[in-house]
Amino acid sequence: MDLLKRWVARQFTTRVIVLMPVGIAIDIVLGSTVQQALKLPIYLDSIGTILVGVLAGPLAGALTGILANLIWGYLLPAPIGSTTIGPFAITAGVIGLLAGLWGQLGIFRPRRGGRASIVAAAVAVVLVGVLALYTYARAYASPDQFVNITGFQTTDFDRSRLFFLAVMVVYVVLVGAALYLRRDVGAVFAIGAGLVTGIVAAIVSAPIAAIVYGGVTGGGTDALVAAFRAGGDSLYQATLKQGLLSDPMDKMITSFVVFFVIGSLSRRFIARFPNGEKALGSEPDVDSPAASES
Amino acid sequence: MIAATEVPGWGLPEYVVRRPGGLYRSTNPSTKLAIAALEVVAAFAVPGWPGVLAVFAAVLATAAAARCLRGLAVIGLATSPIVGSILLINLFLLPGAADPIARFGPLAPTWSGLWFGLQTVARLFAFSAAIALVYLTTAIDDLLADLARRGLGRRAVFVVGAAVQMVPRTIERASEIVDAQRARGLDTEGRFWRRARGVVPLAAPVVFGALTEVEERTLALEARAFSAPGRQTLLRVPPDTIVDRVLRWAAVIGLVAIVGLRAAGRLG
């Protein structure tokens, strides 16, 4: 019991309490203004939540996500505030919780090795790509093969093919770009964690979208829900499939941005947070300006 | 801008002793929250039209009394994209609907789709309006002061209060960053991949800019004994009259009753 209390108290230091509103503001601002400026089919509304989760822990991350959605939905006046966001507070909480778990496992720490580890990671990414291509060629060559191998219905063939291809392309492109830009194997872990977070977020948010909004949320993803429903899917199936298409991509991109942000912050700043040591890793960062100053 | 004039006889600044005036606006914030929770649960848990219409009528009557119908109309307009989506998708694509209103080539709007879409939209309006009425008639600092009086910790109060204050400033800063990056040649209108390349150049400065305040704020809070033990002394507490308490408990009992009846299958 005492251990649990200490674990909870450790996540809510004054520094974390100050970071939480910053994370909430980042979620709301990037989810509204920047997303509107770029007009991309992703949400970008959990960068702050994942950042707090990774640096502070699961409870702080979950609370940041829940509060961000509740404040965005119910405390800020229109046009910034939007009551449609509020019910998705549960999803945001789960995203923060998972981010905290990834932070405690040290998933987001940099893994800057020599050329050998970069080459090994690149080979691993190519292997994943080849395996994906093989699966694609085997299972998605024809509807019959798809039914035989996966056991799903023929009606799911085209949509599953689209989903599989889109997620694999985004995964390979992101990981490749991360390796090229950051020369850091840690990006592979962070983007992989984003993929898992996205799948869980889709599963959690599907019933909320179906029950509260009849499957649509007024965004660009409504066209996907419409397409799935036109194909004969139930409300829940359509929202789940829409979520499985957009959430993994969104969370992979979000995780990459958070990994980039953490890698760019000074070691001294990060080390002061509860999960700071785990986010930094044990190896000294030879490239960072902070390290070279000391 | 709040004038920090002294109130004769009290010796306290005006912003400390000011009381919200007007019907419903002067109701205790926690009572408003309880009523809103009851309305939201009623809109979703009572099947068919009666629950939604009752909530709608109650919210509109209260908003008229509190003179904030215009604010509710603005929020209603803000939900128009989702309303359009809900109506269109359900009108044309409700699975299993076989009662067409008319046929336009491959498209056939159905009565069942229209009915389901209208009901979903009405629920959405009732739910949004019930919540919006609370924040249209309640100052954030009143709500936080009342929640703090009821035991909400100073950390939670700080997180919510600071976030609400920080959002408009960060939005202003984000708009400046978007303009600056556009001036440097960032393509925000071109093809998908060109726009996707803008995520990091736009998101990173917003995040770094917001994080710069963390160190200073932490030191400032610690210097003001933020983590000291003991309860905080509140300078201003919103009034909580007998009427407020009766209304609040009635709302809580109503909420529990609706959830219980729904769970027992008595609501149909």
Image: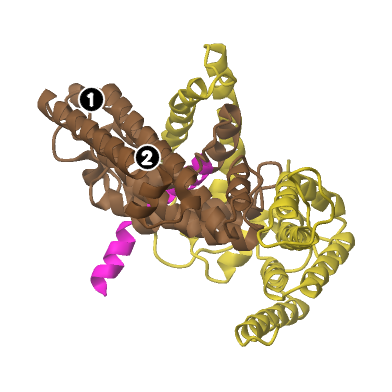
Dot 2: within a 10 Å radius of its alpha carbon, few (fewer than 14), some, or many (20 or more) residues?
few
Q: What residue occupies the far top of the structure in this picture?
A: B184
Q: Amino acid at mark 1?
A: Arg
> Is A22 within the magenta?
yes
Above or below for B71 versus A112? below
Q: CA distance from mark 1 to mark 2?
A: 36 Å
Closest to the observer, A122 or A52: A122
Q: Tell me, by letter, which chain the rendering colours yellow.
A: B
> Is A48 within the magenta?
no
Q: Residue at x 64, y 86 (%)?
A: B265
Q: Secondary structure at mark 2?
A: loop
Q: Residue at x 50, y 63 (%)?
A: B232
Both marks 1 and 2 on one chain: yes
In the rendered structure, the answer to whether residue A244 lies left or right of residue B254 reads left
The chief SS type of the magenta part is helix
User: Which residue position is annotated with label 1?
Assistant: A183
